[in-house]
Image: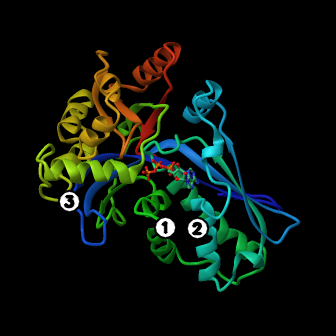
Amino acid sequence: MSSDSTSVEALAPGKVNLFFAVGGVRGDGYHPVASLYSAVSMYERVVLTPTQRRGITVSASIVEGSLLDQMAQAGEFDLSVVPLNNKNLAYKAAELLLLEQNLTVLDVSLDIHLVKAVPVAGGMGGGSADAAATLRAMNEYLVRAGLVDAPVAESRILEIAATLGADVPFACAGGLAVGMGVGDELTHVEAGGSEDSALNLVMVASTTGLSTPAVFAELDAGREQNTYPAPGQLSVPEELLEALTSTGAPIARLHEISRYLRNDLQQPALTLQPELAKTLGFQDAQIVASFVSGSGPTIALLMESEADAEALAKSLRRRGRYAVAVKTPAE
Ligand code: ATP
């Protein structure tokens, strides 16, 4: 978080799920999950700036060179799909934080500017990251502006985050975490100590987004017809956590990790967007594994090294694809 005399800003990361087991749909429409969230080094930035008009406005721009920018430059993404009003998750986050402090949007005159890098409706939790960064920035702003005496405690921020969406608490926390419940009951996992232990991914975006509820609905319908396996036990395998926290030989460790990667939403996402199979099936000697990120359609390619990830991302971009190298877990 940083700020000058007029504005306050905060970052929050996009994510992949290294493991995502989805249980049967509950009576309330939600799905219990066992998720292993891992933040990626692709950040949404939120800047709060005082304005002359009472209330909150939302504006947005795109980080130059980001995955989103690559698509926008090619005319395949338009920021107009992001609602710049009270439907935006960042606006809702600001409203809830104000409410927690017994204030309303009319007690502030602010623009929430979203500097977006994460693909929209891409399964990487971009909107959730905007909400998380807004909670943090707003919490700081209200104290700095003298509107409240004390910030909302971090534990309460996580509770408010959970009411905004299942992925928002993790976007507040970052790093690596097991998410139970609907993904919001987090247990932090300490990743293998050194800087080198982070995984290198190439994230490949798709020009058509996927609606998260539609992917879950496809999973439910397919399970009823036995097209997809029935929900198994909802837990993240210890072997995966051990492999991630180990400091073993780099390539052997990556292969061990890849044995346990799982995403129950991958097949439903592929049914809805069959062309994703092509990206998942990319052949490159340095690709250790490929998987759909969350509800898709963004695909993660697990690479042997940072240099391999950079080289593949570059070569994919030359071939007209939208690709970027990232590290995970990131803070
Ligand atoms: P998840 O990974 O949690 O499924 P996602 O990253 O796939 O989410 P988002 O980018 O968060 O999806 O946005 C999904 C939809 O939500 C968008 O199509 C848009 O209409 C709406 N939306 C609301 N707030 C935002 C926001 N701050 N940024 C982007 N989209 C938003």
In front of the other: 124 or 149: 124
Three-letter code for the amino acid on which mark 3 is drawn: Gly
Q: Are marks 2 and 1 in contact (CB under 8 Å)?
A: yes
Q: Residue 93: which disc?
A: 2
Three-letter code for the amino acid on which mark 1 is drawn: Leu
Q: CA distance from mark 1 to mark 3?
A: 21 Å
**Above-or-below relation of 99 to 264:** below
Q: Is residue 15 left or right of residue 149?
A: left
Q: CA distance from mark 2 to mark 1?
A: 7 Å
Q: CA distance from mark 3 to mark 2?
A: 28 Å
Q: Is residue 269 left or right of residue 319?
A: left
The total of numbered circles placed on residues is 3
Q: Which residue is found at the position 44% from the left and 69% from the top?
A: 162
Mark 1 or 3 closer to N-term?
Answer: 3
Three-letter code for the amino acid on which mark 2 is drawn: Ala
The residue indicated by pointer 3 is 23
Q: Which residue is found at the position 50% from the left and 56% from the top?
A: 128
Residue 319 position within the rendered picture, expressed as x and y whole percent measured from the top left: 49, 13
> Circle 2: is it few (<14), some (14-19), or many (20+) Cα within 10 Å?
many
Give the quadrant of the N terminus.
bottom right
Q: Secondary structure at mark 1?
A: helix
The residue indicated by pointer 1 is 164
Residue 110 position within the rendered picture, expressed as x and y whole percent measured from the top left: 77, 65
